[in-house]
Amino acid sequence: MTIQQNTKKSPGFLALILLELTLTVSFLQINNLFTFPLLAMWIALAVAKMVANIPKVREKYPLTAIRQKLAKWGVKTENQKKQGGVLRTFLTWNFGSQVAIYLYTILLVVFQLTESRFLSTNVMTFINGLSAASIVYLFGKRGVYASISALCLAWLISVVRTFVSPAFDSFWKNLELHDMSFGAGYILLYYIFCHRRWSRYHVVCCTVVALLILLAFKRIGLAALAFTVVLWVILRIVKTEKKRRAILLWGSVAAVVVCYLFVWIIVEGWLISFLESVGINPMGRNYYYAALATHCEFTPGFLGLGRNASATLFSMEYASMRVGNVHSDILRMYAECGFVLFGLWLLVFWFFLPRQIGKKYGYRPMEFFVLCTVYTFIVYATDNTELYLVNQYFYMLMTMHVALTKEQKPAPLEGRVVALYELLKNKAAARAALRLETKSAEKED
């Protein structure tokens, strides 16, 4: 069933149209003066609806016409209790970790352990995840599909705008839409790993998303997608859930260790020396990394510079580099959070949040979240997508959607992957048996 068929019978049809229009404008990111108020509007409506539905508020205050409308605002969704639980889980750990980092920065400034100029409003960081949670709360799965449509529409508008642009000779360069392409990766992973009920709408959206990613040709994004899909195939080959959980657990341990090693070799200068020795062109990242590394120490006593320190440094001290940030969220988060808080931030996404999802909503939503986190952190190695609107929006949106989905059965593609593996396995066994027979026959002769 398509999104249009879903919404024709719904009293929230006009609200969904408004949602899609505002998200399209937001994803185009014409100007933050447009983007933030549009997303803040949905956050405000979600908060108003949430407050209006609190039992104590219902008891204490009379059911006015306005409050009644707020309590029912949006599209009626199934299983409100489960939906509220998913939102609390994600907001507690994802949004909560962002608030903790911000409060930590305030403490660093108060105790004069960092410079006050590094402290900012941090609106961008807060609004990305909150807007995704708000739209899930207001619209459920229809909000998810409207978001996917909005991204596709925003990309098509960008393509048309490129055609009519006076600088048409840079057409391919203009298709390198960083934020959209990385955000589209989560949608593609969802369609490959989880989606079961295909329709023309989903086929079109999946095709557009795949084109967006391919034409943008972000190498780290394509590599992250390829690695994540390979990991998913390995998990499908493993037959028992216990073994799959073990792979994800030890993989998460390895991911945390790799993140610390990545920071270590940058701070010590070894990564830059290695890239120069083998002739790899890091496209200026070696200079960015070296610049920020001078402000870091790889020791448990390193307290960090505070949230937004990296952007401030590259807009002032290193303005001559003409880059907005360090182009590595892993290095940036270490520099801003310090040795210990950086580790806690890693634990939230690799252990605490997956554990809560698995405990409350089952193995498959937990697996999908970990796979999306694998994709996310590979991209984090060389880009600043932790600050990107579309990237963080779909990271939270698609993982929340899967946690809310009642369907725990395997996706259609999963059965084909397993069948192909069994076919190849049987063919390999048949070849091995044939070789043994041939060798034994030769010996007898």
Image: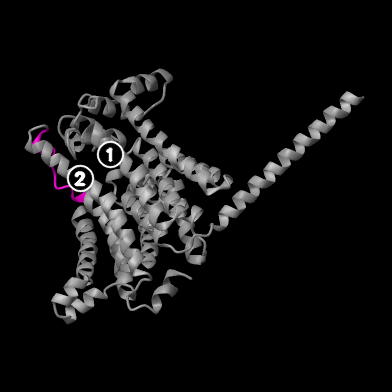
Query: Pointer 1: residues within 10 angstroms few (<14), some, or many (20+)?
Result: some
Q: Quadrant of the rendered structure where residue 102 is?
A: top left
Measured from the top left, where is residue 382 in percent x and y? 35, 35
At 19% across and 40% down in the image, what residue appears? 307
User: Residue 169: which quarter of the image?
Assistant: top left
Q: Is residue 378 left or right of residue 334?
A: right
Magenta segment boundaries in residue numbering: 114-124
Q: Quadrant of the C terminus?
A: top right
Foreground residue, 32 or 412? 412
Q: Are marks 2 and 1 in contact (CB under 8 Å)?
A: yes
Does 401 lie within the magenta span?
no
Q: Tell me if residue 260 comes above or below residue 375 in the rendering.
A: above
Query: Where residue 63 appears, x then y in whole percent?
Result: 17, 80
Residue drawn 25% across the image and 56% down it: 130
Q: Amino acid at mark 1?
A: Leu
Instruction: Point out residue 43 in the picture as x, y percentages from the top left corner.
Output: 23, 62
Residue 160 in view? no
The type of residue carrying mark 2 is: Ala
The residue wearing badge 2 is 100
Q: Read off the residue under disc 1.
A: 344
For residue 221, say whether it is visible: yes
Determine the secondary structure under disc 1: helix
